[in-house]
Amino acid sequence: MPQNLIEVRDIHKDYQTGAGVFPALRGVTLSIAPGEFAAIMGASGSGKSTFMNVLGCLDRPTQGEYQLDGKPVSRMGSDELAAVRNQLIGFVFQGFNLLPKLTALDNVALPMIYGGVGGAERRRRAQSMLEKVGLGDKLHHKPNQLSGGQQQRVAIARALVNEPRLILADEPTGNLDTQTSTEIMKLFTELNKDAGITVVLVTHEPDIAAFAQRRIQFRDGLVVEDRRA
């Protein structure tokens, strides 16, 4: 087993704009060990969301090396990247990204369809995961019948259902009130401590970052601070 789950070396990411080339990442090097809980912080435009897209295999770096669980992501083809996203990584987004016509159970079961899991097993695992996040009584509710916090719990259950080693959460409390945000962050903390899942989240809120053991500050496409609690 590799010592680090995430290893990035001299990662650059450039975007072509009407005004020329914009360097969103300008040489980021860092590693994250299995079981860490890290918060990526920074102002809008600092490069933190671009970095998360690279970590999540949603975007390729312009330059640099990225190894995930010892595998060279930078050299993977699109099919390999899709398999990594489905099996190794769970995603949680600010906007929940639930399908409005599907029940909570069916939303959570979605990633298993792509993984070829049979119908009965999908339902069993989806129900178990919803129970784990405290929504065992909401299996057949659709997103518009759930509060924001409940929708985010469904999204977390969906992220966990394929038993990923890594959760990537992009502003997961951005649409939630303070109390609900605290509840969601306590859930992430439990998943990290009890299940040993590595959690990396993007936030611009210091009180949310305080739940993490490590805080990595981005500015102008560079890591300017990296400290452990």
Image (spheres, rainbow, N blue to C red):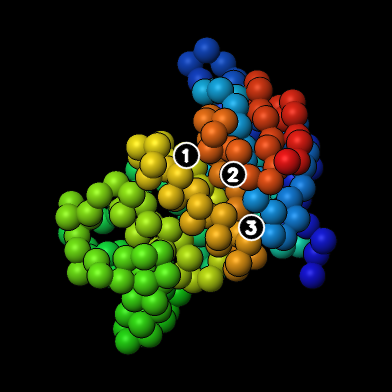
Q: Residue placed at 75% from the left, 34% from the top?
A: 226
Q: Which type of secondary structure does the marked residue at label 3 adopt?
A: strand
List the residue tagged with mark 2: 211
Q: Position of residue 129 (x, y in %)?
A: 41, 71
User: Can you say which quadrant of the picture contains the C terminus?
Assistant: top right
User: Can you say which quadrant of the picture contains the N terminus?
Assistant: bottom right
Q: Residue placed at 54% from the left, 51% from the top?
A: 168
Residue 140, placed above or below residue 174? below
Residue 206 horizontal side relative to residue 161, left or right: right
Closer to the eye: label 2 or 1: 2
Q: Tell me the kind of residue under disc 1.
A: Glu
Question: Which quarter of the picture shows residue 108?
Answer: bottom left
How crowded is the residue under tag 2: few (<14 C-alpha within 10 Å), some, or many (20+)? some
List the residue tagged with mark 3: 198
Q: Mark 3 or mark 1, which has the lower sequence index?
A: 1
List the residue tagged with mark 1: 171
Please identify the residue farthest to the front as the structure is shown. Answer: 179
Q: Residue placed at 34% from the left, 76% from the top?
A: 127
Residue 217 horizontal side relative to residue 179, left or right: right
Measured Cα–Cα span from mark 3 to mark 2? 13 Å
Residue 134, placed above or below residue 97? below
Q: Which type of secondary structure does the marked residue at label 2 adopt?
A: loop
Q: Tell me the kind of residue under disc 2.
A: Phe
Closer to the eye: label 3 or 2: 2
Measured Cα–Cα span from mark 2 to mark 1? 13 Å
Residue 181 horizontal side relative to residue 21, left or right: left
